[in-house]
Image: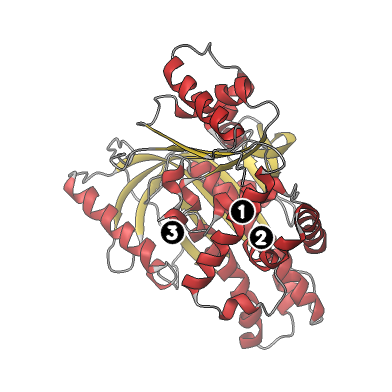
Amino acid sequence: MRLTSLFVANVAPPSRAKQKSKGKSQRAKVPSQTPNPQSPVSYTPSHLAERIRAEQAALEARGSTDGERKTITALFADLKGSTALIEGLDPEEARAIIDPALQLMMDAVHQYDGYVAQALGDGIFALFGAPLAHEDHPQRALYAALRMQEAMRRYADTLRTKGYPPLQMRVGVNTGEVVLRSIRKDDLHTDYVPVGHSTNLAARMEQLANPGSIVVSAYTQHLTDGYFAFKDLGPTQIKGVADSLNIYEVLSVGPLRTRLQVAAQRGLTRFVGRRSEMEQLQRALEHAKAGHGQIVGTMGEPGLGKSRLFYEFKLLSLSGCLVLEAYSVSHGKATAYLPVIELLKSYFRIESQDDERTRREKVGGKVLMLDRSLEDTLPYLFALLGIEEQPSPLQQMDPRIRRRRTFEALKRLFLRESLNQPLVLIFEDLHWASWMC
């Protein structure tokens, strides 16, 4: 069999050190907060709870008795229409409707390692970047916001089928500074002090959002521009702020996935050196085109230029090839097969606005046109893309068998495609892909 495929991976070495947020101590009086009938430990997943307690231990070890200054992203979300929804209902029946909505909000926050500081009534207040530090906390917050809005739309549809009024959610996000003072290990309550308007602006953004929308401050938009698509809502007068501030509505995930892509959009410096590495990649590509499949792994510490090397390789060498790229991200570890899912969406040209039927038609049509003998791979591809029929027979399958057959389906699909044209699969930041373990 003639195999014209090249697998290229960008992966940081196992010794890659985790980045830590540098703190600056500051004495400040903790403002009073509305009592929370639920402590964070009651709704925080155990794996996050363990990491939060470890952060407190690290805080104590550093001797930061006055707290550490951290840049965080705050998110407020609440339900619009909940009063009309529960009017005339028994209190228990009302909670049975509202509580699942609150749960999907919290699930979305926890999916991206955020911390739900408060869950009150019909809304939540969450922090990204503290107490768990992440350099990409603004992106995590917006991914969580989009995820909860999508989940809320599905939940609202189920309520409509039962005859209940519409239920929508507003989300506001802002990035700013807080001083993290301490974390109580028993209930995970986090003692923090906002610096300036950091958290208040997030609350104001939520109040300005229309039902079903997400509104962010200009600073958050600046940090995430390209990763997400925005609508400029113009300058707006914010209560408690002297000058008008620009605000933005989040429309969708944007076309860019990596910092290099964002930098390339703004203009890159001249590429120099790396001649030896480029020649190795080009030799591997020539072997692949000759029918001998190749695997290339590029390892190095962050910032050495692995992604830039791939970028230049694509520009100079990959004409006439089918190039599929996937991007592993730190917050994608909780989502199984996330890079492969993105790879498949690119291969089948699946758009975010496609409904389930359209997605099934794109996948099934392309696979059967490629080779009808691949028909038995469809259930596994549908399952990866979340469009399998329900109930799915794969759900009853032993997980190890299902995993093996899923990989076999992917291998057969891409090997068959490589017979038609040279195929290059590029995986960025493969060290974040938990499915490879």
Q: Secondary structure at mark 1?
A: helix
* Mark 2 to mark 1 CA distance (whole Å): 6 Å
Mark 2 surroundings within 10 Å by alpha-carbon count, few (fewer than 14), some (14 through 19), many (20 or more): many
Element at label 3 = loop
Q: Is residue 306 visible?
A: yes
Between 61 and 307, the one nearer to me in the picture:
307
Which one is closest to the eye, mark 1 or mark 3? 1
Residue 194 percent coordinates (x, y): 42, 44
Q: Quadrant of residue 386?
A: bottom right
Tell me if residue 391 comes above or below residue 47 in the rendering: below
Splitting the image into 4 quarters, where does residue 46 fall? bottom left
The residue tagged 3 is: 33
4 above or below 157? above
The quadrant the C terminus occupies is bottom left
Residue to which mark 2 is pinned: 385
Q: Earlier in the sequence, mark 2 or mark 3?
A: 3
In the rendering, at what x and y percent does residue 393 appear? 64, 79
The residue labelled by disc 1 is 341
Is there a contact, CB below 8 Å, between mark 1 and mark 3? no
The residue closer to the viewer here, 283 or 192, is 283
Type of amino acid under label 1: Ile
Q: Earlier in the sequence, mark 2 or mark 1?
A: 1
Q: CA distance from mark 2 to mark 3?
A: 43 Å
Secondary element type, mark 2: loop
Query: Which residue sits at x=67%, y=37%?
Result: 255
Q: Residue furthest front?
A: 1
Residue 16 tag number: none
Tell me which amino acid carries mark 2: Leu
